[in-house]
Image (cartoon, rainbow, N blue to C red):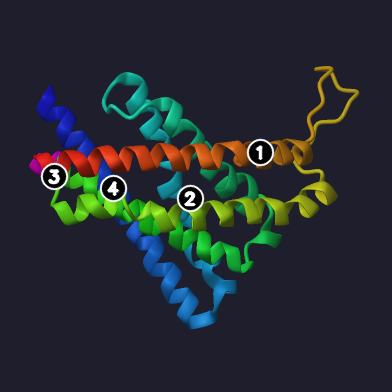
Amino acid sequence: MAAVKRAYLAAYNWAVFFGWAQVLYFAVEALLRSGHEGVYAAVERPLQLAQTAAVLEILHGLVGLVRSPVSATLPQIGSRLFVTWGILWSFPETRTHILVSSLVISWSITEIIRYSFFGTKELFGSAPSSLLWLRYSSFLVMYPTGISSEVGLIYIALQFIKASEKYCVRMPNKWNYSFDYFYASILVLLVYVPGSPHMYTYMLGQRKKALAKSKTA
């Protein structure tokens, strides 16, 4: 069973790695060819597939396939899915903003490093020290640029969310229930305020442990 588990995790990590590599390639190609306005159109489908595939990581944690705590994985994946589907896919007006480029490049570089690191570990039992360093150091730059892009795009989308009333449920209705996507999006933005520094601090702690462990290995 241990061999099956490792084979599955290796296949999963490398499959998603290639998905993110495709996203980065298409993003850079579009950026050079037509500017930031064409980036989303070039990466839309591979971005959606690669990011949605991360839902499996939550399941991996729940069933014990990996040791990553679900409490750390869920908020990060949830926020990314919200931006991918709840903002970019749902509100086309946001797709040509320059923040889409910084978002896609930050996410893809981060994930290319992360999935190649775990894929290598599952295949060979360990990863090169250079890849380990990248895994636990690239976030120092990529996390702030990624988070800033996420927050910026949600904020930009608020005007379109309010004007369209998309996903809103108004009373009266047979469920006696109301929901306002505009205020829900504002709530998501507010969660970023304490959530982002907390996650950054958590990753700094993980970096310290991982790099200290590599020195003593």
Q: Which residue, given by chain and number where applicable, does mark 2 sit on?
A: 48
* Secondary-structure class at tag 1: helix
Marks 2 and 3, Cα distance to the nearest angstrom?
38 Å
At a point 52% along the width and 44% down the height, the residue shown is 80
The mark nearer the N terminus, 4 or 1, is 4
Q: Nearer the viewer, residue 215 or 112?
A: 215
At a point 42% along the width and 72% down the height, the residue shown is 28
* Secondary-structure class at tag 3: helix
Q: In the figure, is residue 115 to the left or right of 109?
A: left
Find out whether the residues at labels 4 and 1 contact each other: C-beta distance under 8 Å.
no
The mark nearer the N terminus, 3 or 4, is 4
Q: Please determine whether, in this image, residue 60 is positioned above or below residue 113.
A: above
Quadrant placement of the C terminus? top left
The amino acid beneath tag 3 is Lys
Disc number for residue 188? 1
Of labels 2 and 3, the one closer to you:
3
Disc number for residue 215? 3
Marks 4 and 2, Cα distance to the nearest angstrom?
17 Å
Q: Which residue, given by chain and number where applicable, does mark 4 sit on?
A: 115
Q: Position of residue 179 (x, y in %)?
A: 78, 30
Find out whether the residues at labels 4 and 2 contact each other: C-beta distance under 8 Å.
no
The mark nearer the N terminus, 1 or 3, is 1
Of labels 1 and 3, the one closer to you:
3
Q: In the figure, is residue 172 to the left or right of 33?
A: right
Q: Which region is colored magenta?
A: 122-126
Find out whether the residues at labels 1 and 2 contact each other: C-beta distance under 8 Å.
no
Q: Nearer the viewer, residue 81 or 89?
A: 81
The image quarter containing residue 194 is: top right
The amino acid beneath tag 2 is Gln
The mark nearer the N terminus, 2 or 3, is 2
The amino acid beneath tag 1 is Val
